[in-house]
Amino acid sequence: MDCIGTKNLRQVLEHKVKQFGDKEFIVFEDRQGNVITHTYNQFDEMVNKYANILLGKGIKKNDKIVVHMLNAPEYLFSWFAIAKIGAVMIPTNVFSGAFEMEYYLEFSESVAVITEPNFMEMFTSILPKCPRVKHIFLARTSPVYPNNKLYPTATIIADVLKDTPTEVPPSDIGIEDDVMMLFTSGTTARPKAVQLTHANAIFAGMFGAQWWKVTPADRHFIVLPLFHVNGQFISVMPTITAGATGCVSRLTITRYTNINNKISGSGSPPAGLPGWVSFSFYRFRQLDQYMVHGVQSNQALAGILYIEDNIEDTCDDGGE
């Protein structure tokens, strides 16, 4: 794909860090209203720490790693850490059950899983059937729990972050190397594995940023699930490509309705917007500006409501 040049995803991220180092890259608000921000520099530092944690456990180029988490900065740390060392991310739907996850792990020949406490019981139940999986990395743990006792076989990322270096060794990654393997929904048969390369990810970022005229001043309201290609290639990659800011949220039906009632006076999308997508208005407490969900502007870009009301999130009382 000559139009994208020769940079892999690691090089693209590191180039953007040099351009926009102290600029906000990620703003995340959890269900309790706690707001966490990461500049481009801070994000890259966390990505490098995650990458070194993986390398320290013997993860290497072309190894497959399942990432099974809700929307959070830790998801992005994991994705780009995997990309930086030349491994391959397997993003999986958080609504998947044990039967599906066993299939994904075995078919992809994954050697590791990055997940959060909500899903540990499921993984513990299927790992005996997945002998290739050698490591579980646990993110978004709460410091109020004895995590090492609760999850003795897992690497608790929060416990090793502080002493992990922030420089990642060089890696030999081509733009046509795989960066992730997605599974289709499996409506007619078992889910199909779709391989995507570094070139695919970079092209998606370039196309999206140019098509929506994204600028560094833009704030992209990201509520699409990060395990889905739309969240990855429509939301995240154009944001990075343009040097913009991604505002990551975990909207639920209840919060969506409350937000619309508060801002527009009703639970309905604003008049005049396309009817095939759910729109909402939201104000981040610490941003002092509206981000219009679904309208091309300097506040935000389009997104689709991500519903996770039926998943109990026990991680938002703490974490990394």
Image (cartoon, rainbow, N blue to C red):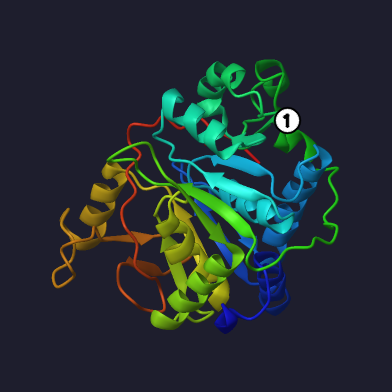
* Residue 278 place in picture, x, y as percent: 24, 57
In the rendered image, the residue lying farthest to the front is 189
* Residue 153 place in picture, x, y as percent: 71, 21
State the residue position of label 1: 155
Q: Nearer the viewer, residue 106 or 11?
A: 106
Q: In the figure, is residue 14 to the left or right of 202?
A: right
Q: Quadrant of the N terminus?
A: bottom right
Q: In the figure, is residue 126 to the left or right of 77?
A: left
* Residue 192 place in picture, x, y as percent: 42, 44
Q: What residue is rendered at 31% in x and 46% in y?
A: 255
Query: How many residues crowd around disc 1 within 10 Å: few (fewer than 14), some, or many (20 or more)?
Result: many
Q: Quadrant of residue 223?
A: bottom left
Q: What residue is rendered at 84% in x and 58% in y?
A: 167
Q: What residue is rendered at 68% in x and 50% in y?
A: 87
Residue 286 visible (yes or no): no
Residue 137 visible (yes or no): yes
Q: Quadrant of the C terminus?
A: top right
Q: Nearer the viewer, residue 69 or 135?
A: 135
Q: Nearer the viewer, residue 183 or 114?
A: 183
Residue 44 sits above or below residue 116 on the image: below
Q: In the figure, is residue 305 to the left or right of 195?
A: left
